Amino acid sequence: MKGALSWPFMRLYGLTVLYFSANAILNVLIPLKGDSLGASNSEIGIIMGAYLFTTMFFRPWAGHIIRQNEPVQVLRAIIVINGLALLLYTFTGLEGYFIARVLQGACTAFFSMALQLGIIDALPEEERSQGVSMYSLFASIPNVIGPLLAVGIWHSGEMTSFTWIIAAIVILTGVTGFSIRNSASDASDPKSEGQSGAFFQSFSSLYRNPYLFRCSMIMLIASIVFGAVTTFIPLYAPTISNGSAAAFLTIQAGTLVAARFFLRKKVPSDGKWHSGFIMTILFLAAASTLGVCLSSSFRGGAFLFYTSAGLMGIAQALLYPTLTTYLSFVLPQTSRNVLLGLFVATADLGVSLGSAAMGPLADLTSYSVMYFICAILSVFVAAFAYDRGGNSIWKL
């Protein structure tokens, strides 16, 4: 195999699976544990949101620092720190969880930027979208089985198995990460871009660059929706007749993985803005959250509930690779790493707000009202994505 499916890239994808495995379990276990300890939705949302909120702050610096240092050494350092953060979950309470989420967030900023920038730089333009999609696919694979493991651990009432699983993930990630050499992970010349002098000036591009601004706003609002669904489904599912959070998240993740693999060649890789394609993705997110909202109001709502999981999986699978690939073409080459870091930071901020801001909203109203507002946000951002000058009809 060659290109995005060649052996050096497959090794990095394997490391990606291991790195994100723990989070797939924690995303379900932390809300359940917090609820059992009497934490409010707001408190749970803050703990969950701390992970990507921290990642958001470190993304731009990660894109810059990775180019100024040996990528393999950076990768190994963050694997060690992330392993220590994961071990905190095995013997601490909610306060320790918050600290661990912050540490994980900082590590993830460097890990994901190192791999994504390497993939973008190493692949030819026509395969760039496939590489980004494959990275995103393997980052999502743990979410297929992670929720089932988390629910199984929780219902067993025995947290010893959780400790052993976390320890195994830490060890396997460390062994895999330390076995990677420069040739596999250093896809481009770390000194190839002169970002040092213009690093801080690049931040103003978030609102001055029209391409970056539009993509960032779309990703921010869509990620609020994605974050709200992921965080509060474990608490909302019991209100649905025959509803299961594990089943919902597994269907969502399974659909996401399948869509990223089978539709990876459909993601535009030509540097053009495909309004119709992007709007379709956002309307799928709107339909999904509206379906989640209505699931508790109808008899047999489980069917609508699980259908919504599939729609959300497709939306998540396609939006991020589409916008990231588009920006890789239109952003200035001299500051692309930092600007892509800023873009990904808006996605992190959105997911964090989906936890931290939507939690209080659910406390004040209800889960159904909160998900209905998410549907409205999805429709709004779909309208924002429309561009009369772009290609408004793009078929799957």
Image (tube, rainbow, N blue to C red):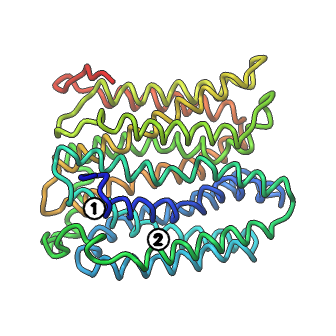
Q: Which mark is residue 368?
A: none
Which residue occupies the foreground of this view, 142 or 231?
A: 142
Depicted 246 relative to depicted 2: above or below: above
Which mark is nearer the camera, 1 or 2? Answer: 1
Residue 109, x across and y down, in percent: 41, 66
Badge 2: residue crowd in 10 Å (few <14, some 14–19, many ≥20): many
Q: Residue at x 17, y 40 (%)?
A: 271
Total of numbered circles in the picture? Answer: 2
Drawn side of residue 152 relative to residue 267, left or right: right
Which of the 4 image quadrants contains residue 322?
A: top left
Depicted 179 relative to depicted 46: above or below: below
Drawn side of residue 17 relative to residue 394, left or right: right
Q: Which mark is residue 106?
A: 2
Residue identifier under label 1: 117
Please, what secondary structure does the residue beneath circle 1 have?
A: helix
Residue 11, x across and y down, in percent: 39, 64
Depicted 275 relative to depicted 109: above or below: above
Q: Residue at x 38, y 39 (%)?
A: 319
Depicted 387 relative to depicted 154: above or below: above
Drawn side of residue 339 relative to residue 264, left or right: left
**Is tag 1's residue or tag 2's residue first in the polypeptide sequence?**
2
Q: Residue at x 22, y 46 (%)?
A: 127
Quadrant in which the C terminus is drawn: top left
Q: Amino acid at mark 1?
A: Leu
Q: Amino acid at mark 2?
A: Ala
Please, what secondary structure does the residue beneath circle 2 have?
A: helix
Residue 280, x across and y down, in percent: 38, 25
Q: Residue at x 59, y 80 (%)?
A: 84
Residue 278, x across and y down, in percent: 33, 31
Which residue occupies the foreground of this view, 234 or 9?
A: 9
Q: CA distance from mark 1 to mark 2?
A: 17 Å
